[in-house]
Image (cartoon, rainbow, N blue to C red):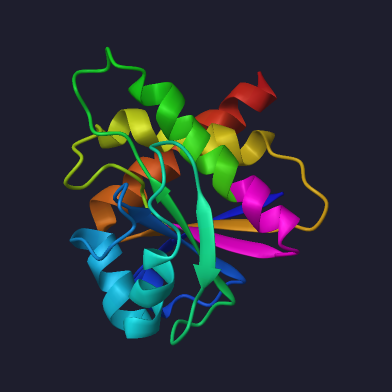
Amino acid sequence: MQIELFEGDITRFAADAIVNAANTSLLDGGGVDGAIHRAAGPELLAECRTLHGCATGQAKRTGAYRLPARYVIHTPGPIWHGGHQNEAALLQSCYTQCLRLADDSGCRSIAFPSISTGVYRFPLDLAAPIAIQTLAAFSGVCLQKATMVCFDAVTYAAYQQAVQALDDAHEA
């Protein structure tokens, strides 16, 4: 699968599926979650209410409404508690579950935010390699491209470093 990096606003990024770094209620929150809900319109919140939440590390799909995508895939990432509460495995599961759900839905492209690195305080230097390695390891039927949509230059640089480290490891 092709992995790309993009610095910008995920609510304006065109892909078959856009991932929402959601809370477990799947109801409108802050950060990326709030931005996605505002851009998609009230229909997204109405559909999310019918899903009855989602466990951390899992994923659920809705329509995308006013977003430039077919679907929004919601995944609650782990809250950072120092790395001793299975946070890395839960974060990896977020990416894996989103990839599987997108592939099962016939998506060819998916766009991710940096899950859990905002208000959930997962360290960016630890989260970026988990995301990139999980994307690189995925093999599906339909999914051909995954894009990490980085909100700012610091996040973009962390993901660039993770891609370079993966490339270096493959060359060694």
Q: Is residue 107 magenta?
A: yes
Q: Quadrant of the C terminus?
A: top right
Query: Along the line of sight, which residue is nearer the eye, 54 or 93?
Result: 54
Instruction: Please tell me which residue is depicted at 45% across the width and 82% down the height of the picture.
Output: 67
Query: Along the line of sight, which residue is nearer the eye, 161 or 30?
Result: 30
81 shown above or below 106: above
Q: Quadrant of residue 76?
A: top left
Place of residue 154 in the rendered image (x, y in percent of width and height, measured from the top left): 24, 50
In the drawing, does residue 58 fall left or right of residue 128? right
In the drawing, does residue 166 fall left or right of residue 112? right
Bounds of the magenta segment: 99-112
Place of residue 108 in the rendered image (x, y in percent of width and height, measured from the top left): 72, 64
138 shown above or below 142: above
Instruction: Please tell me which residue is depicted at 19% across the width and 18% down the height of the picture.
Output: 82
Q: Is residue 101 magenta?
A: yes
Instruction: Please tell me which residue is depicted at 30% across the width and 52% down the height of the picture.
Output: 25
Place of residue 29 in the rendered image (x, y in percent of width and height, measured from the top left): 21, 61
Can see residue 142? yes
Q: Quadrant of residue 90?
A: top left
Place of residue 171 in the rendered image (x, y in percent of width and height, measured from the top left): 67, 25
Residue farthest along the top direction in this orientation: 84
45 shown above or below 152: below
1 shown above or below 56: below
